[in-house]
Image (cartoon, rainbow, N blue to C red):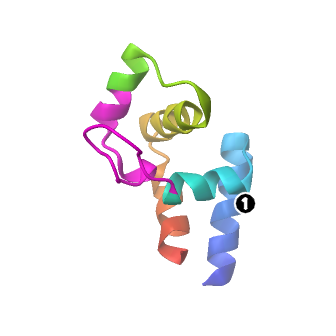
Amino acid sequence: MYELFREVVYVCTIIIGMEKEILLELVTMEMPYGRYKGQILCDLPEPYLAWYHEKGFPKGKLGERLALMYEIKLNGLEYLLKEIKKRL
């Protein structure tokens, strides 16, 4: 099972072109404010992320992670994060 986890992280890193730490943040970082305060970023609903996409993401690290999560969900790749989240 650990090999599957490593493979999923590897595939995510190649497909999305990002560091493992960023993937781990998407499945551990909580929304710090707003309607979904306390919810893990990968669990935010797509309409909420689409709203941010339309209005503008916040500046800084949070905005970057929300924008990335929007792209992941938009392209149907959130299943890749489920395996990472399951392993934590």
Which residue is most to the left? 35
Q: Amino acid at mark 1?
A: Tyr
In the rendered image, the residue lying farthest to the top is 55
Q: Is 7 left or right of 55, judged from the image as shown?
A: right
Residue 35 screen position, x and y as percent = 25, 39
Of the pair 16 and 61, the residue shown nearer to us: 61
Q: Residue at x 35, y 53 (%)?
A: 39
- Report the quarter where the C terminus lies: bottom right
The quarter holding residue 6 reads bottom right
x then y, percent, for residue 7: 69, 68
From what the image shows, is residue 57 above or below residue 68?
above
**Residue at left 49%, top 40%?**
69
Give the main secondary structure of the magenta stretch.
Answer: loop
Residue at left offset 63%, top offset 73%: 5
Residue corresponding to mark 1: 10
Task: Tell me the magenta residue range.
Answer: 29-50
Residue sitting nearer the eye, 61 or 42: 61
Viewer-side residue, 49 vs 75: 49
**Percent position of residue 41, x then y:** 44, 48
Q: How many marks?
A: 1
Identify the residue at image location x=44%, y=51%: 42
